[in-house]
Structure formats: structure tokens, C-alpha cells
Image (spheres, helix red, strand yellow):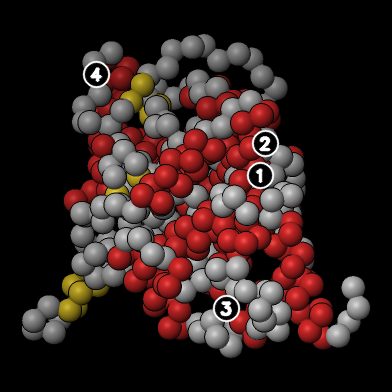
Amino acid sequence: MIIAHQLLGRALTGSPPPGPRPVATICRVPHRTKIGLPRRLPLVPVPVPGESLLSWLGCMGRLLGVNRGEAAYVSGVWHVADRRVVSGVSLTNQRSAIFGLDDESVERINAATGLSAAAARDMTWTRFTGTALPVEFGHSDPSRKQRMLKENWVNPASLSLCPGCFDDSDGRWLLRWSLPWAYACLEHDCYLVTACPTCRYRVDEAAVVRGTCGGYLRDRSGSVQRCSTEFRHVRATRIRDVELLRLQRLLDGHLQAAGELEMNQARADFQDLVALGVMAVYLATPDHLDGADAVVRDALSVFSRRYWVKYGRNMNRSDIDSPPKMVQAAFLRVAARILFANDPLAAASDLVDLGKNPMDPSLVPLHRSWLHRQPEVTERVKPIVEAIRAARIEARGVSL
Ligand SMILES: [Zn+2]
Ligand SMILES: [Zn+2]
């Protein structure tokens, strides 16, 4: 609180705020509005490009000496009646502001912080409407949004980070780091970090907020100590794999797509990659990863030992919906190789040769899954989906 008062005092007297955190005072006078508004804040952190709303609120909370829920209230993200409801700004609660801001919220945010509606909405999942998520995402109700996220392979609770970016921005975290479409940072030339290299504890929300690992280590005397590795100092694994580099470049471009043509192309690639990625979940092994970096190949080896392809992978739902990030990168690599081949159907036979063995037992779980719900794909991938759906139907002796 003392720090907050000092900062607020400096802002009011016009002297610059201390510390490296990017901060702006915004002087535009708020327009009149019908909603009960919080007062204009004297200090507002400038969102870094692609930042998560929760990261921004955390930064504001640190500036003001309040928690994230209170920062959401004073910045207008959350409204008065729900001031104490922390779920309103949680990572996963389906009513959380992270899944989209209504008109009243953006009006309140603008009044309290001077942030435009577009800048505020860019920090929520609606940022990816029409690219990584369907065009109707922004206007859907909360439960339908959750379904869409799942169907598009997005797990909002999955967190990873680039230590270099994390350091450069003084601990801000980006929304895209929760997407399957971001497994590497091309600026720092590394894979994203999903677990602490010291104790292997996964990167979770408390850890990114704190900036240090929340795992525990046993020392020589046998006593248990908090690991507390600082993520900004973690050395991330360099990315060398040209295929995954090329794919990440394409995906980064797609996530920034603007204009109808570009967005349609991006959406088509994301849809097809989800379908082929799920196909790879059921069928890919390290044998399909020639030329891949060890970190990706090793991740798939562990996954493959747990779930054997030979008799049909019988997986936990969470492993299908949200595999570990490096395993997912392996699946995307396999999927992209098929999607961007001259003949995707022929390239898919690398995973399973339908012509040779339409009754291949490894195909059963995928076939079952696609019979239950046919994936939405473009014409490029339709023949593959149809061949797999048909293969087991023939095997069962049901006429087409
Ligand atoms: Zn980076
Ligand atoms: Zn650790």
C-alpha cells in the first residue's frame, strides 16, 4: 500500500513513476455515461501487445497495492455488485471477463482507464474471433464459448511462457501462450517453457503471477524447500527444427490476420490443423518426427509409451483436448506435413495406410470419435475424414 500511495502521489504531482514497468497516465476526460462509474485512475499500465487481461489487471494491482479482483473493480472490468467475486476475473470460470467484455464493461473501462474498446477486447479471448476461434465466438453465450474453445483445441488454463519476453516486459504474460498455436517464440528463438527446469513443476497461474516457480525441492538434509526459480532467468530450449520454425511463422501470421481474405485463410488452416492434429493424437509416434528437435521427440516418446498406438490409443479426455504443449507441437508438425502436402490424402497414409488395412485396430478410437462428431474441415481434408469414417464402417459390413 505504501508503494501504491507513493506512486499515486508521484502521478498526482506530475513526477515520473519509478521502476521499469511501462506505465502511462492517461489524461482524456471521460465522457458522461449512464453506468455507475469508478473514478478515473491516475495511473494505468499500458497493455503490452497481446497481453492477457488477467496479466494487465495483475500489473495494475501491483501498481495500486490491491489484489486482481479489486483492480478489476477500480478499472471498470468488473461491476460493483460483483466486486468481491474473484471468479469474474479468473482464468477458467466461464463467466470470467477473460472470455469477452460486454458493451457496458468496455464503457466503464474507457471511463476509468482511457483504454479504447478495441484495446480492452484485445486482451480477452474474443481477440481470436474469426482466426483461432469461429466467427460467432464473440456473440455466443458463456457455455457455448467454452464448447468452442474445446472444439478448437484451446485450453484457457494451459500456461506457458517465453522467459525472454517475460523478462523484457517485466512479468507480463500473453494470451496466445495458452493457445496450441504458440509453442515457440521467434523473437527469442526458443520453445515456450511449460515446466520449471529445476523441479519440473508445471507453469501455473500462481507461478506466472509471482514470476517464480511454486514447486518444492528436497535438499541434502532431506528438508523440503520452495523451488522459487525465477522464470525470467530460465534458459529455454533453442528451436532448430526448420519445419516447426516455418509452421510457427505461419501461425503467428494467422493469429495477426486482418481483413476478410486473410482471416478466412487463417480460419481454414486452424480448422484443418485441429482435425489433423487430433488424428495425430491417435496415430502419431516418434517415427513420424524425422528432423524434429529432441525436446519435441522426447515428449512424444513419453506420450507414446503411455498410450500405445498399436491397439488403438485409449486416452484420458484431457490428453485429447489438451495434450502437453511439446506433445501438441509434435502433433501439429505431423498435421502440417499432411495439410501442406501436394496430396494430403496420400500424405495421411504415413500415419495409417487405409488402402492396405482398413481394419487397422489403431484406427478404432479415431473412427469412433469422428463418427460421434464429424470435424469441420475444408475440401483439402474432407477426403481424409471420409476415408477414416468409411474404413471401419466397411469393416463392420455396413453398406455405405
Ligand atoms: Zn520471447
Ligand atoms: Zn521449480
- C-alpha separation, residue under disc 1 versus residue under disc 4: 47 Å
| Nearer-the-camera pick, 34 or 200 | 200
For residue 7, say whether it is visible. Answer: yes
Residue drawn at x 72%, y 63% is 385
Judged by depth in the image, the label closer to the viewer, 4 or 3, is 3
| In this picture, residue 395 sits left or right of residue 164 | right
Pick out the residue farthest to the right. 399
Q: Secondary structure at mark 1?
A: helix
| Nearer-the-camera pick, 205 or 253 | 253
Number of on-image labels: 4
As drawn, 78 above or below 109: below
Judged by depth in the image, the label closer to the viewer, 3 or 1, is 1
For residue 71, say whether it is visible. Answer: no
- Say which amino acid is labelled 1: Ala
Of pointers 4 and 2, the one earlier in the residue sequence: 4
Q: Secondary structure at mark 4?
A: loop
**Mark 4 highlights which residue?**
16
Q: Where is residue 258 shown, x and y percent of the image?
A: 59, 27
As drawn, 27 above or below 223: above
**Image quadrant in which the C terminus is located:** bottom right
**Mark 2 highlights which residue?**
264
Of pointers 4 and 3, the one earlier in the residue sequence: 4
- Say which amino acid is labelled 3: Asn
**Mark 1 highlights which residue?**
268
Q: Residues within 10 Å of mark 1 (few under 14, many from 20)?
A: some
**Mark 3 highlights which residue?**
316
Q: Where is residue 313 shown, x and y percent of the image?
A: 57, 81
| In this picture, residue 215 sits left or right of residue 178 | left
Of pointers 1 and 4, the one earlier in the residue sequence: 4
